[in-house]
Image: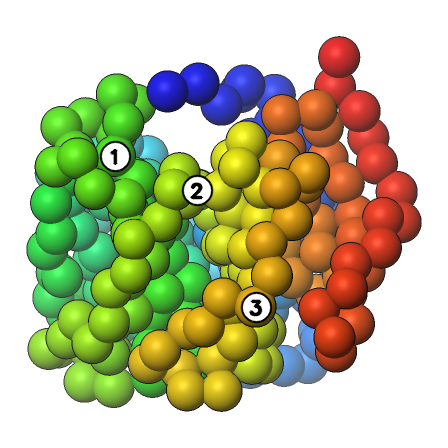
Amino acid sequence: MKKLPPILFIFLALIGLAILLYGCSENSDSAVNPQTGTGGSMARFAITGNTLYIVSKQSLEVYDIADAANPVKAVTKDMGIGIETIFPYQNQLFIGASDGMYIYNNSSPNNPSYITKYTHFQSCDPVVVQGTYAYVTLRNGVSCRNGAGLSSLDVVDVSNPASPKLVNSQNMQTPYGLGVSGNRLFVCEGDNGIKIFDLTNPELPVMKKQFNDIASYDVIVRNKNLIITGAKGLFQYQYDDQDNVTLLSKIPVL
């Protein structure tokens, strides 16, 4: 499987950070939760209120950024190996790992507490959450350790965070990152493009369109705009209610 160029992660991280900080500036008086801004599903950092969360391969690091110029480490949570991504939603942190999804309670933002772990076969594991459902892509491949030969989009009921339940799974081609907004779910399929799913029934995503010409690895969804990283750079698209997409801008990578 083609490896994702590290520069693309840097691009998405920078854009995600800009959106996170922009979200903070717009909502400076908002409560600590839910998430203050928007980041990609493959992000290794996230901000909620005055707290910055960073995941390494083995741990979760928490920083108090009330004084943005002088961040203070609050705590480090050891989590084993294979930690990949983080996605805050309401009072929980959803942390993707190569063998499952960790759920932490972050009602006390500077000291999140472990709730449970939803386990799956070893695979790459970005996750996004909306309402009472988590959407997880599992991708088999060398970079994701010892996959079981399957790639899928899983829907997990997290209405009870202590007891997540798989409610739907469907085969995918080469799924990477994903994003959700309202009744639309966007799933990146690497060189196979990007797919748009209808979430009228949130337990049963129904694919409406696939754009094979939009190579994509991760996506940030905001105000009907898509910020996508792909093999050739970073792209911004606009989409409408009929799932048409229009290119707005791009930062090419040669």
Q: Are marks 3 and 2 in contact (CB under 8 Å)?
A: no
Please count the marks in the image: 3
Cα–Cα gap, marks 1 and 3: 24 Å
Q: Nearer the viewer, residue 8 or 139?
A: 139
Tell me where residue 140 appears, x and y as whole percent: 25, 34
Q: Which mark is residue 140?
A: 1
> Can you see residue 111?
no
Whichever of callouts 2 and 1 sits on the residue coming sooner in the sequence is: 1
Question: Residue at the spot x=78%, y=58% of the render?
Answer: 245
Q: Nearer the viewer, residue 64 or 209?
A: 209
Tell me where residue 66 appears, x and y as whole percent: 57, 60
Question: Residue at the spot x=43%, y=42% of the render?
Answer: 176
Q: Are marks 2 and 1 in contact (CB under 8 Å)?
A: no
Cα–Cα gap, marks 3 and 2: 18 Å
SS label for mark 2: loop
Q: Amino acid at mark 1?
A: Asn
Question: Residue at the spot x=88%, y=42% of the render?
Answer: 249
Tell me where residue 8 appears, x and y as whole percent: 61, 27
With respect to residue 17, does 186 lie above or below?
A: below
Whichever of callouts 1 and 3 sits on the residue coming sooner in the sequence is: 1
Q: Which mark is residue 176?
A: 2
Report the residue marked by disc 3: 208
Cα–Cα gap, marks 2 and 1: 10 Å
SS label for mark 1: loop
Tell me where residue 109 appears, x and y as whole percent: 38, 68
